[in-house]
Image (cartoon, helix red, strand yellow):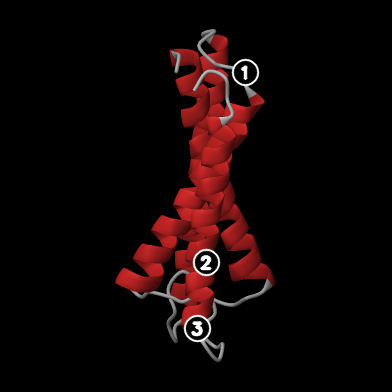
Amino acid sequence: MSKKDKNLFIASFILGLGLLGAIDGIVFHQLLQWHHMILSPNIKLEIITDGLFTAAFTALLIWGGVKIFQDARNQELGYSWRLFFSGIFIGGGVFNLVEGIIDHHILQVHRVRPTADNPLLYDLAFLASGVLLVLIGLLIKRKYRGA
């Protein structure tokens, strides 16, 4: 993989991390209101941790955008849509896997849907979505001519 293609893949991977963080925050925290970053009887703490989470995925989105801009300005950016979308899917899948394994299983700071009859089912579905996104990204990347 050329340096230009590698730069494109890294930037799109970072964007994928941020994008799935945004989807998680918007869908699960705000729209469905299934959980907060930290489940606590203290709503203020829950809202603060959600805000920190929002700041983190926003920083990833900005970082990915700035990287694309800088690499393009320096004429060091590839232009393959396949490579770009593979990075988005793989980055998003990695987000779901890391967030799910660390927050849901290791630290147990929250569950995807703690009030469900079977909260583990939702946690496992979240992990499965991460695996599926990574696999889709790898399939797209595999079809890329430069890979």
Instruction: Say few, some or many: other residues with alpha carbon within 10 Å of mark 1 (under 14 / 14 to 19 / 20 or more).
Output: few
**In the structure shown, which secondary structural element does the residue marked by tag 1 occupy?**
loop
Marked residue nearer the N-terminal end (2 or 1): 1
**In the structure shown, which secondary structural element does the residue marked by tag 3 occupy?**
helix
Q: Is residue 15 visible?
A: no
Marked residue nearer the N-terminal end (3 or 2): 3
Marked residue nearer the N-terminal end (1 or 3): 1
* Residue drawn at x 45%, y 22% as measured from the top left: 6
* Residue 128's disc number: none
* Residue drawn at x 51%, y 39% as measured from the top left: 138
- The reply to whether discs 1 and 3 touch (Cβ–Cβ < 8 Å) is no
Residue 30 shown left or right of residue 90 in the figure = right
Name the residue that disc number 1 marks: 79
Residue kind at label 3, given as amino acid type: Pro
What separation in Å lies between label 1 and label 3 (alpha carbons)?
42 Å
Residue 43 shown left or right of residue 31 in the figure = left
**In the structure shown, which secondary structural element does the residue marked by tag 2 occupy?**
helix
* Quarter of the N terminus within the rendering: top left
Q: Quadrant of residue 98?
A: bottom left
* Residue drawn at x 52%, y 18% as measured from the top left: 146
Instruction: Say few, some or many: other residues with alpha carbon within 10 Å of mark 2 (under 14 / 14 to 19 / 20 or more).
Output: many
What separation in Å lies between label 2 and label 1 (alpha carbons)?
31 Å
| Percent position of residue 20, x then y | 56, 52
| Percent position of residue 23, x then y | 62, 56
What separation in Å lies between label 3 and label 2 (alpha carbons)?
11 Å
Residue kind at label 2, given as amino acid type: Phe
Q: Is residue 63 visible?
A: yes
* Residue 126's disc number: 2
Name the residue that disc number 3 marks: 119
- The reply to whether discs 2 and 1 touch (Cβ–Cβ < 8 Å) is no
Residue kind at label 1, given as amino acid type: Tyr
